[in-house]
Amino acid sequence: MLKYILKRLLIMVVTLWIIITLTFVLMVSVPGSPFNSEGNSNEIVQQNLAKHYNLDKPYHVQYLLYLKSIVTLDFGPSIKQPNQTVNDLLGRGFPISAELGIVTIIVAVISGITLGILAALRHNGVIDYLAMGIAVLGISIPNFIMATLLIDQLAVQREWFPVATWKSPMHMVLPVLALATGPMAIIARLTRSTMLEVLTQDYIKMARAKGLTPWKIIVKHALRNALMPVITIMGTLVAGIMTGSFVIEQIFAIPGMGKYFVESINHRDFPVIMGTTVFYSAFLIVMLFLVDIAYGILDPRIKVAKKEGE
């Protein structure tokens, strides 16, 4: 296990370095100056600003300074908001994005697993068709379309929920629903298919022969093995939710990291673009790593290290 963890950590570092390098190359490849959008037409002013942000130096020097800022966790000041550092923006925006993402994941997992179990237990019944119909709709409708429909029907037409911002639990309902629908549908379909397969296994038949209650059979024996594929895709789902929240945050005017990331692209705010990209990349890589470790721990049949002699 230790050897596997060290190997994965090395792969994580290499992967992050590749992302960092590609991000830097893309940024310096974009023509023009990031200071033009600020109304600085004076060439001397632009040169001084470029010097202040180290953008007048050769690319290899900028790259080394960029790596240094990542190692020291100091991404420097924002170009669009000179009185704010990238660390300040990350510290202010990430807790909100994380709250949105965590609540969304909880809602998606609980509702998806519940729908999948009910569909499997009532296979080819009304509940099965209804649950899978909801799942198909959830997969088919993109989250930004779902967000628009929710705003129109539940906020504008009926005024049940506030339209935008992030001030109370009521403000969380619509963005969470918009984000959770797709992952919930994926989890429901996967849980149903694996649960149907697990329920036909011999150890489930043995548990029934012993007189165990259906609740114990499902929770204690069937559910654990049925959820292994769900755990496998959790890293990808988390990545989709966290990156998908960028669009949802814009639609609902949520002051999370998505807001700063989109604004930084519009204003070509290089430090913010690089800082948010590196931060999210590192976060998602770590999440995938934790999912792999959890998968190996929960399923003793999974071997994370090669057998001796292989």
Image: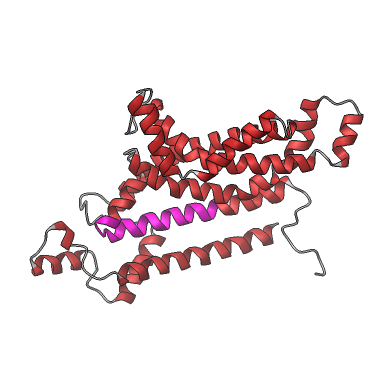
Which quadrant of the figure contains the N terminus?
bottom right
The part of the image, by quadrant, that contains residue 76 is: bottom left
Report if residue 198 is visible in the image.
yes
**Residue 109 in view (yes/no):** no
Taken as a whole, is the magenta stretch helix, strand or loop? helix
Which residue is drawn at the image coordinates 22% and 63% (left, top)?
Answer: 34
Q: Is residue 185 left or right of residue 213?
A: left
Residue 212, compared with residue 29, is above or below; it is above
Q: Position of residue 279 (x, y in %)?
A: 42, 54
Question: In the image, residue 164 lies at what x, y percent?
Answer: 32, 33
> In the rendered image, which quarter contains the C terminus?
bottom right
How many numbered discs sit on the rendered protein?
A: 0
139 is higher (above) or lower (below) than 206 = below
Q: Is residue 268 left or right of residue 43?
A: right
Q: Quadrant of residue 216?
A: top right
Looking at this view, is 265 or 186 the one in front?
A: 186
Q: Quadrant of residue 198?
A: top right
Residue numbers of the magenta segment = 265-287
Q: Position of residue 295 (x, y in %)?
A: 68, 49
Q: Residue at x 34, y 33 (%)?
A: 166
Q: Residue at x 63, y 37 (%)?
A: 132
Q: Nearer the viewer, residue 120 or 210?
A: 120
Answer with left or right where residue 201 lies relative to residue 31: right
The picture places residue 79, in percent across and down from the top left corner, at 22, 57
Colour scheme: secondary structure
> Does 199 appear above or below 77?
above
Q: Give the side of residue 178 with respect to residue 117, left or right.
A: left
Q: Is residue 281 magenta?
A: yes
Is 270 one of the magenta-colored residues?
yes
Question: What residue is drawn where x is 57% and y is 41%?
Answer: 136
Q: Is residue 210 above or below residue 25?
A: above
